Image: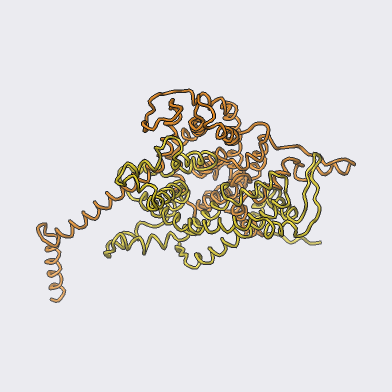
Chain colours: A yellow, B orange
């Protein structure tokens, strides 16, 4: 038998397998197989004992339970999609704006950057729940956000009116947006470094205003990063453990209802994938890549 | 003749424009300066306002943590009238602080170092070699970033609980028994093992960062090493890795912070032993919320705040030390879309 001889480049490319081999083992055993298992669980009744687990095939029963029997799942799913749709554009535009501001040269820029990336360090897990309670609730001593308005121009009786309610939700939104946009600002800021300074020099020589420069240069050239940010924000909001669907999945998991939990996970994952693909289809068409 | 005329005309115009007392010129300068000034003012106001929103809960956390007015006193705003260390002491006890910090440090430092090693290898492989099926394999990397770990954590959990060394343990079945399994849950290995194999918390993202970084490095270095007779692995260890300091630092910081803050996976893996801070604090917070308003001697809301303060102090110290590198390296490394 004759073995085909490899060229030198082909040989050196084989070395690539060596470099990724560790990852390959990992991805198979910690990603591909678990994901495949979850698929099997979702079609089965899973029972766990001390010696291991047993699965019994039950067909579509778990999916049926999630979609048509369980009163919460579909409702929570639509709720989280709707709130995601409302949140993503605001968050992405906000972080783009802040990134552009933080990219300008001014005194105290370093301090401002430190402040705006602080949420990246803290804003996850349990701390954020307690901190956001600090930022919004009024149950400790009444000196929270409400006090800012009460102390200001608004008369006392207005504080319960719809105007106040609206202002409060707005304030809550700003709080959420500020605390959730750290990574996105970071992404946009690194994106801004990729735009050559010469573009701005040329355009300002031609008499473009800062406003025009933003829409004609910055915005289009940032579009790949916008796509990245949109996808990141969607995943982030879907996988947030405070998300109602995640809570449902976790509850089922805690109750050892692995089959049902897996079925919900799969439906959820497929929905996320569809949303991301749709977004990519819509946004991707308008993405402009700089030609190197 | 014509050219000369135009030139002189131009010169006249330029002289007119640059004439300091020219009304047009002054108008332009004034509007230019005014818009810049207004923008600077607006920017400062905006940044201060938003910065306040970010820092507000942190300041109130600080204020609560040392507040001795357990019944609540609405007259104080920032500085407590009765300063106390009692909240902190109680929180320290609730959290079993030294033990929990030790656990968290073991998990976070160990996993991030392992992730740097394994992810940089994989990232280099993807950046520099054109092997067959590379695109499909890289799609897997992207998928592992996109698919939320929550969707397959059930199966992962069972795998860790009955860890069989990648199926090798199933040999045990051949000898007429059960599969050889070792429980990884409740041990640091439940985080270290996946990190060793470039998985774990957001492993895919780090591979992506390393790939981008290595792809941007000049190839000449490696070619020179190759000519000098250096093999691929040595080239990587001796030439590429020492130059990838900023990428390593970025990955280390992100990985450390995410491991420190992780609650979801940790809560699955650590049920009885070796719990990290995030898990302990969550369990205790349930208890503390139940106790709120129950006991008159201590305010559990304050203790909860003190506990959060204790758990974030190490991160804040790290951030204070490394913030310069953190921000600059991310801005430099960049993540190309």
Residue B237, compared with residue B13, is above or below; it is above
Residue A68 location, quadrant? bottom right
Quick check: can you spot residue B337? no
Residue B336 located left or right of residue B113: left
In this view of the protein, which residue sits in the foreground, A264 or B24? Answer: A264
Q: How many marks?
A: 0
| Rendered position, B56 above or below B94 | below
Who's the residue at 53% across and 59% down the image? Answer: A82
Nearer to us in this view, A193 or B189: B189
Extreme residue toward the front, this view? A157
> Measuring 53% from the left and 32% from the top, which residue is drawn there?
B292
Q: Is residue B256 left or right of residue A226?
A: right
Q: Position of residue B300 (x, y in %)?
A: 51, 30
Q: x and y percent of residue B63 in the render?
A: 42, 31
Point out the residue furthest to the right here: B176
Let me know if residue B283 appears in the view: yes
On the rendered structure, is A148 left or right of A246? left
Residue B161 pos. (x, y %): 73, 40
Quadrant in which the C terminus of chain A is drawn: bottom left
Residue A125 spot, x, y in % from top left = 55, 41
**Residue at (66, 44) in percent of width and height:** B197
Among all residues in the image, which is located at the extreme left? B21
Q: Which one is nearer the viewer's eye here, B161 or A202?
A: B161
Give the farthest residue toward the bottom. Answer: B2
On-image quarter of the N terminus of chain A? bottom right
């Amino acid at each position: 038998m004759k073995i085909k001889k490899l060229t030198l480049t082909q040989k050196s490319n084989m070395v690539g397998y060596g470099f990724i081999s560790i990852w390959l083992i990992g991805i198979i055993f910690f990603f591909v197989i678990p994901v495949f298992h979850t698929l099997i669980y979702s079609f089965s009744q899973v029972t766990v004992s001390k010696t291991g687990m047993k699965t019994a095939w039950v067909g579509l029963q778990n999916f049926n339970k999630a979609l048509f029997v369980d009163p919460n799942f579909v409702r929570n799913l639509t709720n989280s999609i709707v709130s995601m749709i409302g949140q993503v554009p605001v968050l992405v535009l906000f972080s783009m704006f802040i990134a552009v501001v933080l990219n300008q040269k001014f005194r105290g820029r370093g301090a401002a950057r430190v402040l705006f990336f602080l949420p990246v360090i803290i804003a996850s897990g349990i701390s954020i729940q307690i901190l956001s309670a600090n930022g919004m609730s009024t149950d400790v001593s009444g000196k929270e956000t409400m006090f800012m308005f009460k102390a200001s121009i608004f008369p006392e009786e207005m504080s319960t009116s719809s105007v106040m309610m609206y202002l409060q939700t707005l304030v809550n939104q700003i709080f959420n947006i500020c605390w959730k946009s750290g990574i996105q600002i970071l992404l946009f800021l690194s994106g801004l470094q990729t735009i050559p300074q010469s573009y701005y020099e040329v355009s300002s020589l031609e008499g473009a205003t800062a406003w025009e420069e933003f829409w004609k240069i910055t915005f289009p050239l940032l579009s790949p990063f916008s796509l990245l940010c949109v996808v990141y924000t969607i995943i982030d909001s879907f996988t947030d453990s405070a998300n109602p669907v995640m809570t449902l999945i976790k509850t089922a998991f805690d109750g050892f209802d692995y089959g049902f939990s897996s079925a919900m996970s799969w439906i959820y994952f497929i929905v996320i994938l569809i949303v991301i693909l749709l977004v990519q289809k819509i946004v991707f068409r308008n993405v402009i890549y700089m030609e190197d | 003749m014509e050219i000369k005329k135009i030139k002189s005309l131009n010169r006249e115009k330029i002289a007119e424009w640059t004439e300091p007392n020219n009304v047009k010129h002054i108008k332009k300068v004034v509007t230019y300066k005014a818009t810049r000034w207004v923008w600077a003012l607006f920017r400062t106001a905006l940044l201060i306002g938003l910065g306040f929103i970010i820092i507000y809960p942190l300041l109130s956390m600080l204020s609560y943590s040392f507040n001795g007015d357990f019944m609540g006193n609405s007259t104080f705003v920032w500085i407590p009238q009765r300063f106390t260390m009692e909240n902190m002491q109680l929180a320290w006890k609730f959290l079993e602080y030294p033990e929990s910090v030790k656990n968290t440090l073991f998990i976070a430092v160990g996993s991030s170092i392992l992730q740097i090693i394994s992810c940089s290898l994989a990232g280099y492989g993807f950046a520099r070699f054109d092997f067959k099926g590379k695109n499909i394999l890289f799609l897997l990397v992207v998928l592992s970033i996109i698919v939320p770990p929550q969707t397959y954590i059930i199966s992962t959990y069972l795998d860790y609980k009955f860890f069989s060394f990648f199926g090798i343990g199933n040999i045990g079945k051949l000898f007429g028994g059960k599969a050889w399994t070792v429980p990884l849950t409740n041990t640091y290995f439940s985080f270290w093992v996946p990190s060793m194999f470039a998985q774990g918390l957001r492993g895919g993202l780090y591979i992506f960062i390393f790939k981008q970084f290595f792809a941007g490095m000049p190839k000449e270095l490696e070619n020179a090493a190759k000519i000098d007779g250096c093999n691929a692995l040595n080239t990587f260890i001796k030439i590429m890795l020492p130059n990838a300091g900023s990428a390593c630092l970025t990955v280390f910081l992100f990985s450390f912070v995410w491991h420190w803050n992780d609650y979801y996976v940790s809560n699955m893996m650590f049920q009885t032993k070796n719990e990290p801070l995030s898990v302990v604090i969550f369990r205790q917070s349930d208890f503390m919320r139940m106790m709120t308003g129950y006991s008159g001697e201590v305010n559990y809301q304050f203790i909860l705040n003190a506990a959060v303060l204790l758990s974030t102090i190490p991160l804040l110290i790290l951030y204070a030390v490394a913030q310069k590198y953190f921000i600059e390296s991310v801005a430099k490394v960049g993540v190309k879309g």
